[in-house]
Image (spheres, helix red, strand yellow):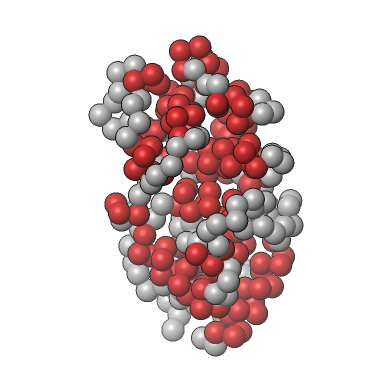
Amino acid sequence: MVRGSLQGRLDELYASFNFPESAFDPIQVVRRYERLKDRELIAFIAAGLAFGRVASVVNSIETVCAVLGPKPAEFIRHFDPSTDSAPLLPLVHRWIRGRDIVALLWILKTMLDEAGSFSERARAIDLKPAYGKVPKLPGVYFFFSRPSSGGACKRLNLFLRWMVRKDGVDPGGWKTPLPGQLVIPLDTHTIRAGKCLRLTKRASPGWKMAADITASLRAIDPADPVRYDFSLCHLSMMGACGYKTKQRDSQCPLKGVCKPAGTK
């Protein structure tokens, strides 16, 4: 594959998705919040819930946002699990329950003015005010994945993409880290695109595959490799990617530079 031709096609694909309403996505909820202190909290919650069908994801995010109101940062700073939990308890999102969201808000409240390793610090917080009897493996830990576990940390990387990058899709707001330091949020769709475009040779999903795909994209755009994530993900979501399908790449905007399964 000629790397230059791939870059041109990826740039075209990126441009075709680089506007606010290009695809139905949780980022549309995050962009509604103009104040940075509100946006970063909503972004973290939204990224943490970003698994499953997109309609279900957005519905769950909207449910939480309705409870937090128009000033979520202020709500969370004054959040008291003993008096403010009731509206959240009915929420169910796959294996996440309302009590897990209560625990998440309690963690965020506790951490707002504290420093340290984010995920490690979060896992050290006393969760009794949120759970009462804390489960052996609290569901809220799902929101605080760690690269040291080998997992891809998709939701944390998605949160960072939203907060660091700024273009027609991502609202940005943070000055550090830099876009060039981001890692792609690895999921089913970016795995499919990554394999089809030969951006990785790894077979098993995880942190190493995420880093591998990111390194391949960084060779194309060192300053902003993750800018291709949204378009590649939604290319797969809309069914245009031909990886392991009968259609192959006949409907794919990247036709000619991708290599679906079975091709050389």
Q: Taking the image as drawn, is residue 101 in sight?
A: no
Where on the picture, by quarter, is residue 258?
bottom right
Q: Taking the image as drawn, is residue 39 in sight?
A: yes
Residue 51: percent from the left, percent from the top?
A: 48, 44
Residue closest to the eye, 252 or 168: 168
Residue 150: percent from the left, percent from the top?
A: 31, 56
For the C terminus, the quadrant is: bottom left
Where on the picture, by quarter, is residue 247?
bottom right
Q: Which residue is pictured at 71% across the width and 67% down the height?
A: 15
Above or below residue 191? Residue 90 is: above
Residue 108: percent from the left, percent from the top?
A: 48, 33
Above or below residue 138? Residue 262 is: below
Residue that sits furthest to the bottom in the current view: 2
Where on the picture, by quarter, is residue 3?
bottom right
Q: Which residue is pictured at 61% across the width and 44% down the height?
A: 26
Horizontal side of 227 relative to 95 (left or right) equals right
Q: Which residue is pictured at 69% across the width and 28% down the height?
A: 70
Above or below residue 110? Residue 177 is: below
Residue that sits furthest to the top in the current view: 83
Residue 145: percent from the left, percent from the top?
A: 37, 46
Horizontal side of 252 relative to 144 (left or right) equals right
Q: Which residue is pictured at 53% across the width and 48% down the height?
A: 159
Residue closest to the eye, 228 or 110: 110
